[in-house]
Amino acid sequence: MADKPAPLGGNYWKLFTGSTISNLGDGIGVVAYPWLATAVTRDPFLIALVTVAQRLPWLVFSLPAGVITDRYDRRTLMFWSNMARTLIGVVIAFVVLAAEDTLPDIEILNDAEAAIETNLGLYTVLLLVTLAFGFAEVLYDNAAQTFMPNLVHANHLERANGRLWSTEQIANTFAGPFIGGLLIAVAFSLPFFVDAVTFAISALLIWLIRVPSRTAVPTVDERRPWKTELAEGFRWLWNHDFLRPLAIILGLLNALGMVTGAITVLFAQEILETSATVFALLMTGGAVGGIIGGWTASSVSRRIGPGPCLWLTLLGGAVSMIITGLTSWWPVVWAMFAFYSFGGVLWNVITVSLRQTIIPDHLLGRVNSVYRFFAWGMMPIGSIIGGLMVTIADGPFSRDVSLRLPWLVAGALHVVLFVFAAPRLTTARIEAARAEAG
């Protein structure tokens, strides 16, 4: 890369466009996959298992993905990951197409046992496909985050990441869900076919990126044993006084998010009484918050400092979850989703840009994967807890109380996490970590 590269360039915009298109497909899936799950079963634990299957690869595959990312060309890994998701998407689309006649109208579905007995095969395919998508996502995301410094100078990483994520939010949680709701109304299988097409287009755009790597890809003779390379990445993160607690705190934060995320679709259907179209509209709240967060993250960080920005995420999560758990009106939940998403994107822009700056390039894939092992590996655990919480509470409490409980518990635990995290996530410590790497 040249000494004074342009802030953004053609290669960045290819990644930007490809990511936006694939996130449009992800946004369609935000509505399509949970709606499919609830058409198959009303059991909160079985629905939560679909989310577990989606997030489990972050727990079991993050570390190997880091080694793969540092061993091979990152652009090529991104291309083949999206091609894999294309093929997986085509498979689930045809399976759903074949089963459309057996899928009941979700608004009149009352017999949970009959639903799962009728569609047990489809539920099994849904779990396997979701799991396969998760493995491809882990490899793609790890390669994409470590690839960004090859495209954009370190001085412009916050801006590049902020622009990318804000646009991804538009596609993922605004346009995508809305389109998904409309497509489901036409045919249950249609959103799955469109999802597959978006990954194919994204793969093509990524393949067209041409940029030299900062460091040479190691040859076969230069590669060391997997355990040795994994241990090197783990030691680097664990010995870092700022990234180690940051990864653990984010892991707990993500677990709390998935306690509620695992049952959001049931909460929306039964407490907020949303249709597929209204549910799609509800999910656009996250898009609005993400857009604002992505475009303002750099300026907000400069004005109040990165430390207080991270505190805002923790406290904002507490407020938004508690209010969501207490309301029955979907516009209020829409606003809380926007507030929660704003904090999440603010957190990501600051911390991901920091990691891309301070981790050595030859270790970036492995250290990033170890970090995400802690940070994202807690998500399936949170999903299980959320599903079990509703299932267990369904006995002594009403269904209404059971579906509200995860929101209230997760909100209260956000406050506890803030008390633990605030002294460890200060602007001074962030700047010290950046200065040490520089």
Image (cartoon, helix red, strand yellow):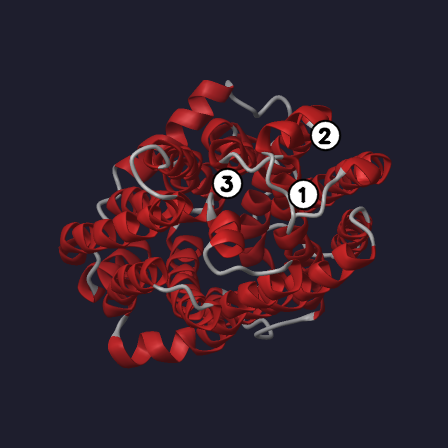
Residue at image point 43% right, 56% down: 352
- The answer to whether residue 376 shows anywhere in this view is yes
Q: What element carries label 1?
A: helix
Q: What element carries label 2?
A: helix
Q: Do the residues labelled 2 and 1 touch (CB within 8 Å)?
A: yes
Q: Give the alpha-carbon distance from disc 3 to disc 1, as whole Å.
A: 34 Å
Along the line of sight, the residue nearer the viewer: 115 or 45? 115
Quarter holding the C terminus?
bottom left
**Image location of residue 260, percent across then percent down:** 40, 48
Q: What element carries label 3?
A: helix
Residue at image point 56% right, 57% down: 148
Along the line of sight, the residue nearer the viewer: 169 or 320? 320
Left or right, 206 with reference to 281? right
Q: Which mark is residue 397?
A: none
Q: Residue 365 carries which label?
A: 3
Q: Residue 122 carries which label?
A: 2
Q: What residue type is labelled 2?
A: Leu
Quarter holding the N terminus?
bottom right
Q: Nearer the viewer, mark 3 or mark 2?
A: 2
Q: Give the alpha-carbon distance from disc 2 to disc 1, as whole Å.
A: 9 Å
Q: Which amino acid does label 3 sit on?
A: Gly
Q: In this view, does 380 lie above or below 4?
A: above
Q: Give the alpha-carbon distance from disc 3 to disc 2, as whole Å.
A: 36 Å
Q: Which of marks 3 and 1 is in front?
A: 1
Q: How crowded is mark 1: few (under 14 residues within 10 Å), some or many (20 or more)?
A: many
Disc nearer the start of the sequence (3/2): 2
**Image location of residue 54, percent across then percent down:** 56, 37
**Image location of residue 305, percent across then percent down:** 26, 73
Q: Which amino acid does label 1 sit on?
A: Leu
Q: Residue 36 carries which label?
A: 1
Q: How crowded is mark 2: few (under 14 residues within 10 Å), some or many (20 or more)?
A: many
Left or right, 54 with reference to 296? right
